[in-house]
Image (tube, grey):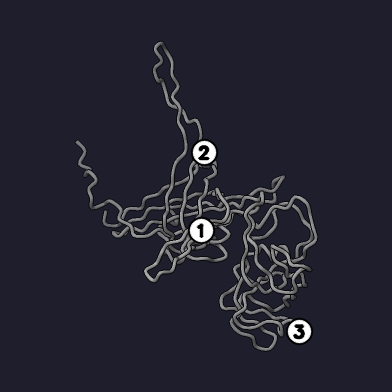
C-alpha cells in the first residue's frame, strides 16, 4: 500500500499578486524569409530566480492585475458502431487566450497593450501642416566615439539643444530596408521602402532620460537598454509615445507570469509566443479620492511551438515549484 500522503490544504498555493515578464523574440536572418525565434524559459534551471532580477533577456513589468487565462482548445469524439459509441477522443484544435491589466504606463507596457507598432513622438521641427504620427523631421544628432551606455559624447552644437530631464532615443538611421526592422527588438515589418531616416528611432526601445550634462558629455539616469551605442547611431529627443487603432503588423512577444506563494512555493506560466487580440484599450477604476486610476487593458492569443522534447504542439507551459518544506 502506498504511504504517500494525500494533498491537504497546507500545500494549496496561496498567492497575493502576479508578476509579468516579457521578452522580444529574436530575429533569425538565416531563414528565407527571416523569422522570429521565441524566447524559451527553463523552469527547472531558472524557475526560482529572484523576482526583481529575472534572467536575461526577460524584462520585468512588475505586478499586474486581472490575470485570467482561458483554454479554447477543442477535443472531438471519434465514434463508431450502431448505435454510435465513442471510441477515442482526438484534438480538434489548439487555442487559448489570456487577459490582464498593466498597472503602469511605460514604453514597454504600452507597446504590449497596443499589439502593433508603437511610436516614439520625436522632438524637432514638425512636418509642414503637422503629422498625426508625430513630426521630428529634422536630422538626428550623432553619437561620437568614446560613448558608453551611460554617457554619450556629442558635438557641442547638439549638446546645446539638450537639457537634464529630457527623454531621448538612440538608434540607427532607416536606410530603406524592407522586411523586419529594428534590433534587438523588432519594431515593424515593412513591405515597401520609403524615406524617413528617423523611422527606426520612432520604433526603438533604446530609450533613456538625461540626468545631467557636463561639457560635451550627456549623462543618463540609467544605461541604454541596447548597451554601448553602435557606430552610426544617432540621438533624438522624445516628448511622449503614440499608438494607433489600425495597421496590419501584429507584434509578437514571449511571456512569463509568476505567482509567488505565501509558503515559498511558486506557479509559473510560460507562453513562448503571444500576440495581442485587440489594439489599444484601457480600463478605469474609481479611487477613494474621487478620481479614477486608468490602467492598460491587454488580451493575448497564444501561438504554438513544437516542443523539442517530443515534437508535441504546445501553447503554454505551467510549472509548479513546491516550497522547500514539502
User: What distance separates the C-alpha of mark 1 from that of mark 2?
Assistant: 33 Å
Q: Is residue 58 left or right of residue 226?
A: left
- Pick out the residue farthest to the top: 82
Against 215, residue 319 (above or below) is above
The mark that comes first in sequence, 3 or 2, is 3
Give the class, few, some or many, for how many residues have Cα within 10 Å of label 3's Cα (few <14, many ≥20): few
Task: Tell me which label, 1 or 2, sits earlier in the chain.
Answer: 1
Q: Is residue 225 left or right of residue 43?
A: right
* First reached walking from the N terminus: tag 3 or tag 1: 3
Q: Residue 24's x, y, as percent?
A: 58, 56
Local SS, label 3? helix
- Residue 139: image x %, image y %? 77, 72
Q: Which residue is mark 2?
A: 313
In the foreground, 43 or 224? 224
Find disc 3 in the rendering and name its residue: 157
Q: Position of residue 39 (x, y in %)?
A: 55, 53
Q: Residue placed farthest to the bottom in the image?
A: 215
Real-space Cα separation, disc 3 to disc 1, in angstroms? 41 Å
Mark 2 and mark 3 in contact (Cβ < 8 Å)? no
Question: Where does residue 265 sit, x and y in percent of width and height?
Answer: 33, 56
Residue at screen point 77% across, 67% down: 129
Say which residue label 1 marks: 282
Is residue 203 or residue 105 the one in the foreground?
105
Q: Residue sitting at 38 percent across and 53 percent down? A: 267
Q: Residue at x 52, y 37 (%)?
A: 311
Report the number of numbered marks: 3
Instruction: Place residue 170 in its image quadrant.
Output: bottom right
80, 145: nearer the viewer: 80
Q: Which part of the image, by quadrant, shows the N terminus?
A: top left
Amino acid at each position: 500500500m502506498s504511504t504517500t500522503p494525500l494533498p491537504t490544504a497546507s500545500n494549496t498555493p496561496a498567492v497575493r499578486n502576479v508578476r509579468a515578464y516579457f521578452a522580444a523574440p529574436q530575429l533569425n536572418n538565416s531563414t528565407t524569409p527571416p523569422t522570429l525565434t521565441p524566447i524559451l524559459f527553463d523552469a527547472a534551471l531558472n524557475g526560482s530566480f529572484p523576482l526583481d532580477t529575472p534572467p536575461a533577456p526577460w524584462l520585468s513589468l512588475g505586478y499586474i492585475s486581472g490575470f485570467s487565462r482561458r483554454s479554447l482548445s477543442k477535443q472531438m469524439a471519434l465514434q463508431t458502431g450502431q448505435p454510435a459509441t465513442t471510441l477515442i477522443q482526438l484534438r480538434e484544435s489548439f487555442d487559448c487566450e489570456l487577459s490582464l491589466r498593466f498597472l503602469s504606463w511605460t514604453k514597454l507596457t504600452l507597446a504590449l497593450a497596443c499589439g502593433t507598432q508603437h511610436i516614439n513622438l520625436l522632438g524637432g521641427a514638425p512636418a509642414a501642416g503637422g503629422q498625426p504620427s508625430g513630426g521630428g523631421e529634422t536630422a538626428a544628432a550623432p553619437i561620437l566615439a568614446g560613448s558608453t551606455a551611460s554617457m554619450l559624447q556629442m558635438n557641442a552644437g547638439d549638446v546645446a539643444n539638450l537639457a537634464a530631464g529630457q527623454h531621448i532615443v538612440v538608434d540607427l538611421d532607416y536606410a530603406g530596408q524592407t522586411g523586419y526592422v529594428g534590433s534587438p527588438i523588432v519594431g515593424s515589418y515593412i513591405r515597401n521602402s520609403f524615406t524617413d531616416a528617423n523611422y527606426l528611432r520612432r520604433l526603438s526601445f533604446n530609450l533613456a532620460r538625461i540626468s545631467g550634462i557636463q561639457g560635451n558629455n550627456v549623462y543618463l539616469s540609467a544605461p541604454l537598454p541596447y548597451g554601448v551605442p553602435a557606430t552610426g547611431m544617432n540621438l533624438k529627443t522624445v516628448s511622449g509615445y503614440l499608438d494607433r487603432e489600425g495597421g496590419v503588423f501584429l507584434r509578437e512577444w514571449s511571456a512569463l507570469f509568476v505567482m509567488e506563494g505565501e509558503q515559498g512555493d511558486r506557479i509559473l506560466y510560460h507562453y513562448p509566443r503571444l500576440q495581442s487580440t485587440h489594439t489599444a484599450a484601457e480600463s478605469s477604476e474609481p479611487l477613494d479620492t474621487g478620481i479614477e486610476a486608468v490602467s492598460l487593458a491587454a488580451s493575448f492569443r497564444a501561438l504554438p511551438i513544437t516542443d523539442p522534447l517530443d515534437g508535441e504542439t504546445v501553447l503554454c507551459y505551467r510549472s509548479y515549484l513546491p516550497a522547500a518544506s514539502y
